[in-house]
Amino acid sequence: MDSLFSLPAEYQALRESVRALADSKIAPAAREVDEQARYPREAAQALQGAGLAAAHVPEEFGGEGADALGVVIIIEEVARACGASSLIPAVNKLGSLPLVLAGNSEQKKRWLTPLAKGSGFSYCLSESEAGSDAAAMRTKAVKGDGGWILSGSKKWISNAGESEFYTVLASTDATKGAKGISAFVVEKSDKGVSFGAHEKKMGFRGSPTREVYFDEVFLPDDRMLGDEGTGFALAMKTLDHTRITIAAQALGIAQGAFEVATEYAHQRKQFGKAIFDFQAIQFMLADMAMKIEAARQLTYAAAVKSENSESDLTFFSAASKCYATDVAMEVTTNAVQVLGGYGYVSDYPVERMMRDAKLTQIYEGTNQVQRIVMARNLPK
């Protein structure tokens, strides 16, 4: 009987190909990207050349048509080498998924086709005073002649300035609260769009995080995704699918840190033998491996539920994000501990991985918010 928990051959092949690409083209620059806080152009070019930067884009628009599990494996393997680089496919999916879910055929052709060619697509939901409480946003779009006038700003926008396109959530009727929020596609070249300074971050330094400003940006009517007032529901539906990509990212970071710690434990000698031979180290590595595998099973299950839009997706997406990112924080912290003093300096990548892991517990909904989401969607 075939194992219920074995990946089909095509996913195994995908993993091997992405890992080879990440090891040869992305990992060598990861340390420099982090230390210089620069965009990982080597990774962007390599991923784009292999059709992996926006693999979720349907084939009819020039993409690979990768399903949710395929995208998870891509992000996982890239994150194993470089967390910042894994935000390229992750952000492209996050930014464009509202278009995939609610756009009409003309809109999809207009923006998904260039995305597949490397344009980049970011997601603008959070604001300075509207983080976990996204419905409190102040960015607004006022109806004008033949379109909308967008004014306001968005905070913590990943790959801002690099992406050509942005899904922006704005209030179109403040009297209706969350039901008065609509979604728009904004282009980097639109008059009135500008970007703030680069945030100086603990981790993921190679992925630019900037504020995006909208100074009376005119948007024709065809820039709205779906019907007026459906933007907030669309944003939440999007996150149900894309939280899983953060779980995948955390999973890859944890896997990378575990591999470094395991190799080091076999090489490092103290008291005349490899430190791996000490039970204290063995137990740490065993716990790390066990929790990574548990996180992987949960994340892959959530990806399948995402692909099939199953009724319990909200619970599983929140659970996978919460669990995998908590595991990543624990694994990377313990990897630093296994390496001791060497883990605390940048000669080894585990200190970078630990810094990167911390953000996965925060963005796309803090893990405290994920627990609220899970509680409200407990399996019945």
Image (spheres, grey):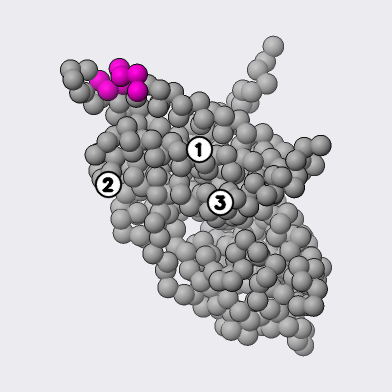
Above or below, 180 against 276 in this view is below
Q: Which mark is nearer the camera, 1 or 2?
A: 1
The earlier-in-sequence mark between 3 and 2 is: 3
Q: Which residue is mark 2?
A: 346
Specify the amino acid type for callout 1: Val
**Residue sitting at x 55%, y 77%:** 213
Residue 162 showing in the rendered view: no
Residue at the far bottom: name it: 145
Residue 304 showing in the rendered view: yes
Q: Which residue is mark 3?
A: 90
Residue 240, given in percent of the width and then of the height, sits at 69, 49
Q: Nearer the viewer, residue 277 or 149?
A: 277
The earlier-in-sequence mark between 1 and 3 is: 3
Residue 150, given in percent of the width and then of the height, sits at 66, 80
Specify the amino acid type for callout 2: Ser
Magenta stretch, residue numbers: 274-280
Alpha carbon of mark 1 to alpha carbon of mark 3: how far? Answer: 19 Å
Residue at the far left: name it: 272
Q: Which residue is mark 1?
A: 327
Alpha carbon of mark 3 to alpha carbon of mark 2: how far? Answer: 26 Å
Is label 1 in a helix, a strand or a loop? helix
